Amino acid sequence: MFIDMKGLRIFIYQEVIDMRAGFDRLLYFVRDRMKGKIDQGHLYLFLGKNRRRAKAIFFDGTGLVLISKRIERGRFMARVELNDITEITATELKQIFNGGLVVRPRVERSFVTSDDNTFLSSGIAQSLKNNERDDATHSRL
């Protein structure tokens, strides 16, 4: 590929756009809406509403480069499927451009309880607190 992937940061625009947008409109989205700096060489990815087209724009040191892809079979992943992901890796960009999905594992948060220094996930800890509260209420009755 003609993009230098070393140190490349790839950002995804948070809303679907009209795929008729060209250099100027996409540059507006990058500068004004995303508060990005196009001249730093980062790539910005835009997805269309019908999920058949995607565009990417970046500055290669001499000018703006606009990449547009229309997928023939299937559809690109929906913007909402990315949840709150605003930055992706070069591998994930390749997956998206090939019609694949970007799926990241959910991280379950754990913490140490002050009672016995055991690790608990946040969901289990909340259940234990609710049970303790119920037990305390029943013991007073």
Image: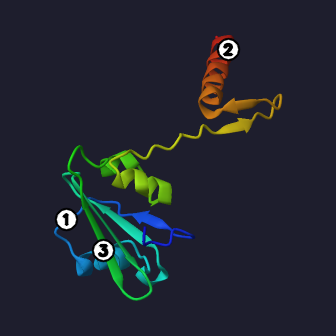
Dot placed on the residue nearer the N-terminal end, 2 or 1: 1
Choose between 77 and 63: the one closer to the eye: 63
Q: Residues within 10 Å of mark 1 (few under 14, many from 20)?
A: some
Going 19% across and 65% down the picture, which residue do you hit?
19
Q: Quadrant of the C terminus?
A: top right
As drawn, which residue projects farthest toward the front? Answer: 1
Choose between 122 and 89: the one closer to the eye: 89
Going 42% across and 57% down the picture, which residue do you hit?
93
SS category of the residue bearing label 3: strand
Mark 3 or mark 2, which is nearer to you?
3
As drawn, which residue projects farthest toward the left? Answer: 20
Amino acid type, label 3: Leu
Amino acid type, label 1: Met
The residue under label 1 is 19
The residue under label 3 is 66
Residue 93, placed above or below residue 141: below
> Disc 2 to disc 1, how far (Cα)?
65 Å
> Disc 1 to disc 3, how far (Cα)?
12 Å
The residue under label 2 is 140
Amino acid type, label 2: Arg
Q: Quadrant of residue 116?
A: top right
SS category of the residue bearing label 1: loop
SS category of the residue bearing label 2: helix
Dot placed on the residue nearer the N-terminal end, 3 or 2: 3
Going 61% across and 18% down the picture, which residue do you hit?
134
Going 56% across and 69% down the picture, which residue do you hit?
6
